[in-house]
Image: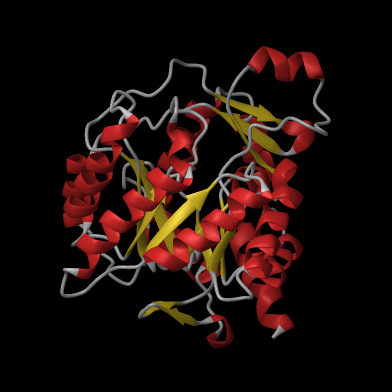
């Protein structure tokens, strides 16, 4: 009820400003002892039935916060109070960059969706490392989502991924290779078989040289063809990385309820939220079937209810992530999903 009121206020503001204001307000609330205790007792209730262990990592529950919400590792302590099983930060690049010109984040309320063309705006990997060095709660599973700088040519992209990997290695629990954002020119070309195999092989080679190798996941677009999905399964099997995150945002605008003129005026960007529910779940199901159930999948895309989380798990995902659904449904979304899954078990 409280979030419904707050949402009306926030939705009057420019989306990026609303994001900063909402997180700042929540952070401030957690600094007040009585409110902090109330919030944590309400949202961080865990059921033993929801515990998971994969790749040596112990998850209190299978619900994570997707990358993009906390691009720089500023909010993971705050957001952990909502009871997430894991939190993914980034996408981070070797060097700080401003991203694309504003406005670059747009709401589609009729579709309960977002369009963004942020362009990997972030403070750079060194700033993220400094924040993670001050990590207070080591019980939070943190994933590092890594990308390349806009000015880095694709034939040199591997160096950007390696820089982020090496600098973050001691401070995150798993890695995600992002080659699927539609908002960095040419980035999705790295999903082609040859460059993608090279990037993942190189990262995995360096990973295996460590005394404690970390799980590496590949985040893919929902716009891949069946033959491209076949390649993805083959590449993951050959490089022996941990698995895939399906999916990133889509460039498809089919079936939106929002007026075509409004969508056209917004322009380019990746669509997320309720509009990509079926698309992302279909990709998860195809990957699960193509791999004969052997591919580890983290499902993301349009989860705005316990039922949608369950659909992705039933399609073949072992873990799920939310982001846009949190904007439209509020912080109770995580609690409601956990409660529903606990009752189901």
Q: How is the image coloured?
A: secondary structure
Asked if one can make out residue 191 in the rendered structure from this viewpoint, the answer is yes
Please report the residue visible at 43 percent of the width from the left and 39 percent of the height from the top.
Answer: 190
The picture places residue 52, in percent across and down from the top left corner, at 49, 81
Is residue 342 depicted above or below 271 in this figure? below
Is residue 165 depicted above or below 41 in this figure? above
Pick the residue in front: 291 or 327: 291
Pick the residue in front: 67 or 285: 285
Is residue 328 depicted above or below 339 in this figure? above
The picture places residue 148, in percent across and down from the top left corner, at 32, 36
Pick the residue in front: 216 or 58: 216
Is residue 242 depicted above or below 267 in this figure? below
| Circle count | 0
The picture places residue 238, in percent across and down from the top left corner, at 42, 66
Going by the image, does 107 lie left or right of 151?
Answer: right
Please report the residue visible at 73 percent of the width from the left and 30 percent of the height from the top.
Answer: 253
Pick the residue in front: 103 or 292: 292
The picture places residue 208, in percent across and down from the top left corner, at 22, 69
Identify the image quadrant of the C terminus: bottom right
Please report the residue visible at 47 percent of the width from the left and 16 percent of the height from the top.
Answer: 102
Asked if one can make out residue 31 in the rendered structure from this viewpoint, the answer is no
Where residue 100 sits, quadrant-wise, is top left
Please report the residue visible at 41 percent of the width from the left and 55 percent of the height from the top.
Answer: 88
Where residue 195 sits, quadrant-wise, is top left
Going by the image, does 119 lie left or right of 331?
Answer: left
């Amino acid at each position: 009820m409280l979030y419904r009121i707050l949402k009306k206020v926030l939705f009057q503001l420019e989306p990026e400003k609303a994001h900063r204001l909402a997180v700042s307000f929540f952070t401030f609330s957690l600094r007040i002892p009585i409110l902090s205790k109330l919030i944590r007792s309400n949202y961080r209730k865990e059921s033993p039935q929801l515990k998971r262990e994969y790749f040596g990592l112990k998850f209190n529950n299978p619900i994570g916060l997707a990358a993009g919400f906390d691009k720089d590792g500023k909010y993971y302590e705050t957001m952990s109070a909502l009871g997430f099983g894991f939190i993914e930060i980034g996408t981070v690049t070797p060097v700080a960059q401003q991203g694309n010109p504003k406005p670059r984040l747009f709401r589609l309320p009729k579709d309960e969706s977002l369009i963004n063309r942020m362009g990997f705006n972030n403070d750079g990997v060194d700033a993220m490392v400094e924040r993670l060095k001050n990590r207070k709660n080591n019980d939070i599973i943190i994933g590092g989502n890594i990308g390349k700088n806009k000015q880095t040519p694709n034939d040199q992209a591997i160096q950007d991924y390696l820089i982020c990997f090496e600098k973050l290695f001691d401070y995150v629990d798993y890695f995600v290779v992002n080659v699927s954002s539609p908002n960095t020119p040419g980035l999705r070309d790295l999903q082609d078989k040859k460059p993608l195999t090279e990037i993942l092989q190189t990262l995995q080679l360096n990973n295996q040289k460590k005394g404690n190798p970390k799980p590496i996941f590949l985040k893919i677009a929902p716009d891949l063809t069946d033959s491209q999905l076949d390649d993805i399964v083959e590449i993951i099997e050959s490089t022996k990385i941990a698995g895939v995150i399906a999916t990133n945002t889509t460039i498809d605008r089919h079936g939106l309820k929002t007026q075509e003129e409004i969508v056209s005026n917004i322009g380019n960007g990746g669509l997320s939220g309720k509009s990509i529910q079926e698309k992302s779940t279909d990709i998860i199901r195809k990957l699960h079937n193509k791999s004969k159930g052997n591919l580890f999948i983290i499902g993301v895309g349009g989860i705005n209810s316990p039922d949608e989380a369950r659909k992705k798990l039933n399609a073949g995902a072992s873990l799920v992530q939310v982001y846009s659904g949190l904007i439209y449904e509020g912080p109770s979304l995580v609690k409601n999903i956990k409660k529903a899954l606990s009752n189901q078990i």
